[in-house]
Image (cartoon, rainbow, N blue to C red):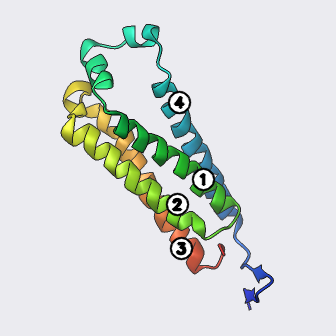
Amino acid sequence: MDTVSNPLKTIKAKAPLWFYFVATLSLLWNIMGLMAFVIQMTMTPDALAQMSPDQIKLYETTPAFVDAIFGFAVVSGVLGCLLLLLRKSLAYKVLVASLIAVLLQMSYVFCIQQAAVVLGADALIMPSVVVIWGLFLVWFSQLSITKQWLA
């Protein structure tokens, strides 16, 4: 029997080594996203001066609620990956919340602000990777619950 549950203790199935590799890589990915958020929120006038006028306009016209959604997305992504490493099933719900926030943020930036028009089509590459990785993490956390690697 892989798991035994009683009111005092839950024993989980042993997760394979690759589970920890994926969870650690995902945590590092989300930490980079958190760093990008901090850089964006603490942009100095000198850094702004290095941007094109269109990029500055895009940066300055982004509403605070979109920045808050961005912050929520990356913080919940980091938390979700930490929960994966701690083998907690709450990781699934946290990663779903992170994915929803990512989708909301990207929808605003690329549909309403039309950032791809300002930044070029290449600007869609990284956001696409972020969305795909977010979808993967939701699937991976659900798989991990099914396999009883998370409890």
The residue wearing badge 3 is 143
Q: Quadrant of the N terminus?
A: bottom right
Counting residues from the start of the chain, the first of labels 1 and 3 encountered is 1
- Which residue is under mark 4? 38
User: Is residue 98 visible from the viewing direction of this image?
Assistant: yes
Q: Which image quarter: residue 113?
A: top left
Above or below residue 71? Residue 13 is below
Under circle 1, the secondary element is helix
The residue type indicated by label 2 comes to Val
Q: Amino acid at mark 3?
A: Leu
Of labels 4 and 1, earlier in sequence is 4
Question: Looking at the image, which residue sits at the far right?
Answer: 8
Numbered disc in front, either 1 or 3: 1
Q: Secondary structure at mark 4?
A: helix
Quadrant position of residue 97? bottom left
Q: Amino acid at mark 4?
A: Val
- Residue 55 appears at what percent x and percent y? 29, 20
For the residue carrying disc 2, how many other residues have a C-alpha within 10 Å: few (<14), some (14-19), or many (20+)? many
Q: CA distance from mark 2 to mark 4?
A: 20 Å
Residue at 61% of width from left, 49% of height from top? Answer: 27
User: Is residue 100 left or right of 108 when viewed as pictured?
Assistant: right
Circles 2 and 1, Cβ within 8 Å, touching? The answer is yes
Where is residue 118 shown, x and y percent of the image?
Answer: 22, 25
Q: Residue at x 38, y 8 (%)?
A: 49
Graded by Cα atoms within 10 Å as few (under 14), some (14 to 19) or many (20 or more), the crowding at tag 1 reads many
Mark toward the start of the polypeptide (4 vs 3): 4
Q: Are marks 1 and 3 in contact (CB under 8 Å)?
A: no
Q: Residues within 10 Å of mark 4 (few under 14, many from 20)?
A: few
Dot in front, 4 or 3:
4
Secondary structure beneath label 3: helix
Q: Secondary structure at mark 2?
A: helix
